């Protein structure tokens, strides 16, 4: 173990449980490394291993009963509406099939190759993407390295022995026996193949061993290595979701990697990984206090935080771990990161390890743009292409509407029908709209005009077209969604009736507001669709506006209903605060105060008890610029909702807490909503000194920030596009160009505006 451990998770013992193992991945191929000595388990995943196949789940009675469901809702009879909707609108079959484990790679040490273990270290180096195990036994040193190469599309396992001992071990790949078969492949490999259910994808996993010294043979379906100084195992996997012959693809990949050799494959992997990962660096707090703690094992550091001690270095590690996990579970050409990223050991995982569209998939990608991982966002856009196609059929058949719709959950097949029978969640037609806004965010950060014209705007427009047809007028003359709901929450009417289905829940109106606003702005940029844009503007004026209720809270529904569960984990009606921009402390102070009251009420009644919910709360406090509240909730997230390997906990494991937490740290340090950059908008006292490099702001620039004693020292803006930069600051600023010359700045109302040129740097400091 070296001293440079600020970017390492490390432990003094093997993993005893799956949530102690260390994850590696290349976007499609993932593995959990346990680090056991005598019998190692490396659990495997491939992102398209989902049970079953595509299914037509359209309920033929949906459109027939839509009007009746709406009538019951407007008559204040939500329970009867829900009873009918459950029968008439839910998809058939009711549920989607799960994402599943690919299986295990097992390494068995030969009988007699044992002894006392000393100097054991298990680690994951985030900077290189390599998990490693090192120890001494019988006077010899042993080391393993495991990584998933994006360049060569293989999982690589390298074992080395230094000293008198040699490596004698066997390896095989396994899965539930009735869903796959294994066989020898030549004299140095094995193949596992099968099908995920009778209508499901076929898969193929290929293993190949390349020893240095010693010998290799295949016995049964085991690859046996005897007396080697080192051995490299290459593993590849594929399914028929992408390839006609998954086994042939796997064989070609391992052969190509083996031909290159371990050193070349490792070098290519680390170079590619570092080029992305090292775009962003973060230091929090005094280095003299951070570095000693980095020398402690990660689980010990976590226990210290759980005991109430602070560890700014562990927070920075958690931030970078989230970036690492997104890189490892989402790359161009792969599927999006699901509820567990790509790491799942079960055939029947919680919530099918699917794509939940009422917060979870969106939260997974909150760090993508700001944390300089824009290309990792691309799988979401690929999924949206397929959701748009399927969702146009669902919009027509269920609602008689144009455009496209997706509900609260989807799967590898981009299912857009209503999934399941859990009424508080499933009857929600907003999933496609919210996810479409990720296209707009990608444009706002990168300002790629072609992307906006060819990919983002067409999907945003189709999402908007659906609501032009779906919205109906309520008694107050507002345009509202019905039937819909505030995700997973319920309310009580004045007549005592309790309902989940709702008329115009606030989150719906806020999402539609963001969607229509984005469409109007995009059409203006592109110079097209003026008539359509005017129609959207008219619709915007008739949406229910964010409103303040009798408790001083932001209302969760269009009317001020009582909450049945005041501490509910979903705080969906604060979408307008984050990730939306309709509410800000500067521009809508009364609504911002109502949002604060909402958070206080939720937390006072037990809210924030799940990992992803706590992560969203940190982002809310950051947007409200309540730095120490944000920090306290960040401590609560890491202390109470993180497993020993720093995986987020719902419970059970759900990866959105990692991604939401990483996004929240970035939100505390840099914000760029409503065309205004804010430097250190929610800097807590605990982070008195520090620096961050490589964060991205909307408007096409990267930002480095250094601060000391809670005050800005310098920010460096790397402009990627020409334009006008606007920085909001209550303190006077000075701006210089790369040559040190003072920039002409328009200052007023706490805003500093100056022109920037593409490819230039600008230095922002507080005026003396």
Image (cartoon, rainbow, N blue to C red):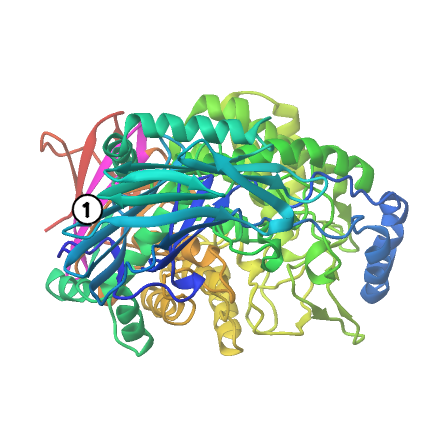
Residue 60 lies, with reference to residue 565, above or below; the image says above
Q: In the image, is 411 to the left or to the right of 580?
A: right
List x then y, in percent, for residue 355.
58, 48
**Where's the N terminus, which quadrant?**
bottom left
User: What residue is at 69 percent from the left and 44 percent from the top?
Assistant: 197
Q: Which type of secondary structure does the marked residue at label 1 adopt?
A: strand
Residues rendered magenta in the picture? 701-725
Q: Does the magenta stretch include residue 263?
A: no
Q: In terms of image quadrants, where is residue 643?
A: bottom left
Q: Place residue 301 in its image quadrant.
A: bottom left
- Give 616 or 287, whichever is nearer the viewer: 287
| Left or right: 639 as drawn, with respect to 529 | left
Magenta segment, principal secondary structure? strand
Height in image: 641 above or below 165? below
Residue 678 pos. (x, y %):
31, 48
Exactly how many numbered labels are in the figure?
1
- Asked if residue 707 lies in the magenta stretch, the reply is yes
Residue 580 seen in the figure? no
At 25% from the left and 41% from the top, the residue drawn is 278
Query: With 768 as the anchor, is 51 left or right in this view?
Result: right
Q: Position of residue 418 (x, y in %)?
A: 73, 49
Is residue 369 or residue 19 the one in the foreground? Answer: 19
Residue 573 seen anywhere in this rendered image of the structure: yes
- Residue 280 location, quadrant: top left
Mark 1, residue position: 733
Crowding at label 1, few (<14), some or many (≥20) Cα neighbours within 10 Å? Answer: some
């Amino acid at each position: 173990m070296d001293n440079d451990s600020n970017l390492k998770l490390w432990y003094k013992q093997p993993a005893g449980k799956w949530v102690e193992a260390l994850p590696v991945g290349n976007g499609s191929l993932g593995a959990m490394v346990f680090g056991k000595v005598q019998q190692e388990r490396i659990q495997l995943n491939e992102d398209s291993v989902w049970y079953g196949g595509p299914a037509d789940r359209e309920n033929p009675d949906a459109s027939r009963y839509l009007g009746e469901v709406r009538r019951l809702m407007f008559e204040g009879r939500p329970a009867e509406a829900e009873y009918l909707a459950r029968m008439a609108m839910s998809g058939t079959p009711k549920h989607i099939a799960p994402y599943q484990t690919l299986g295990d790679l097992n390494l068995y040490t030969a009988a007699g190759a044992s002894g006392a273990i000393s100097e054991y270290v298990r680690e994951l180096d985030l900077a290189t993407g390599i998990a490693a195990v090192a120890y001494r036994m019988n006077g010899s040193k042993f080391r393993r390295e495991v990584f998933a190469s994006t360049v060569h599309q293989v999982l690589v396992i390298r074992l080395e022995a230094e000293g008198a001992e040699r490596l004698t071990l066997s390896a095989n790949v396994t899965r539930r026996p009735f869903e796959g078969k294994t066989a020898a492949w030549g004299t140095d490999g094995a193949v596992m193949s099968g099908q995920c259910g009778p209508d499901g994808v076929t898969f193929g996993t290929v293993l190949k061993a390349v020893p240095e010294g010693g010998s290799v043979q295949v016995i049964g379906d085991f690859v046996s290595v005897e007396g080697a100084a080192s051995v490299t195992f290459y593993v590849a996997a594929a399914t028929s979701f992408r390839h006609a012959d998954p086994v042939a693809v796997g064989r070609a990949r391992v052969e190509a990697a083996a031909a290159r050799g371990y050193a070349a494959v490792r070098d290519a992997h680390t170079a590619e990984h570092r080029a992305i990962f090292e775009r962003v660096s973060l230091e929090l707090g005094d280095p003299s206090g951070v570095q000693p703690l980095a020398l402690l094992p990660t689980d010990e550091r976590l226990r210290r935080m759980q005991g109430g001690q602070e560890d700014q270095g562990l927070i920075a590690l958690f931030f970078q771990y989230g970036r690492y996990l997104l890189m490892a579970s989402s790359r161009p050409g792969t599927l999006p990161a699901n509820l567990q990223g790509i790491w799942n050991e079960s055939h029947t995982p919680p919530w099918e390890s699917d794509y939940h569209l009422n917060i979870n998939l969106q939260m997974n990608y909150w760090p993508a743009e700001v944390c300089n991982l824009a290309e990792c966002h691309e799988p979401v856009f690929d999924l949206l292409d397929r959701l748009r196609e399927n969702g146009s059929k669902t919009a027509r058949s269920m609602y008689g509407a144009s455009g496209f719709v997706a509900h609260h959950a989807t799967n590898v097949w981009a299912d857009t029908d209503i999934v399941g029978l859990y009424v508080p969640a499933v009857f929600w037609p907003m999933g496609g709209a919210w996810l479409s806004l990720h296209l707009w965010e990608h444009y706002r950060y990168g300002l790629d005009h072609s992307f906006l014209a060819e990919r983002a705007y067409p999907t945003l427009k189709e999402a908007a077209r659906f609501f032009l047809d779906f919205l109906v007028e309520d008694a107050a003359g507002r345009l509202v969604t019905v039937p819909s709901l505030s995700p997973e929450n319920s309310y009580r009417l004045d007549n005592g009736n309790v309902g989940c289905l709702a008329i115009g829940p606030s989150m719906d109106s806020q999402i539609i507001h963001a969607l229509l606003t984005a469409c109007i702005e995009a059409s203006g940029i592109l110079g097209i669709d003026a008539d359509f844009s005017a129609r959207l503007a008219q619709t915007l004026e008739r949406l229910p506006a964010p409103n303040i209720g009798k408790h001083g809270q932001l209302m969760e529904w269009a009317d001020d209903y009582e909450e049945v569960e005041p501490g509910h984990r979903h705080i969906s009606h604060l979408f307008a605060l984050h990730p939306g921009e309709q509410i800000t402390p500067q521009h809508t102070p009364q609504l911002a105060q109502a949002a604060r009251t909402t958070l206080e009420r939720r937390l006072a009644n037990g809210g924030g008890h799940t990992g992803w919910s706590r992560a969203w709360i940190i982002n809310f406090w950051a947007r409200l610029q309540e730095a120490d509240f944000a920090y306290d909730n960040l401590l609560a997230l890491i202390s109470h909702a993180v497993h020993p390997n720093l995986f987020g906990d719902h419970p059970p494991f759900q990866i959105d807490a990692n991604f939401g937490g990483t996004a929240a740290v970035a939100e505390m340090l840099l914000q760029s909503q409503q065309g205004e950059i804010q430097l250190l908008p929610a800097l807590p006292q605990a982070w008195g000194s520090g620096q961050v490099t490589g964060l991205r702001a909307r408007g096409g620039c990267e930002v480095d920030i250094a601060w000391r004693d809670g005050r800005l020292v310098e920010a460096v803006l790397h402009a990627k596009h020409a334009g006008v930069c606007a920085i909001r600051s209550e303190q006077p600023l000075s701006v210089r160009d790369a040559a040190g010359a003072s920039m002409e700045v328009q200052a007023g109302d706490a805003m500093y505006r100056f022109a920037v040129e593409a490819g230039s740097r600008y230095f922002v400091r507080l005026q003396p």
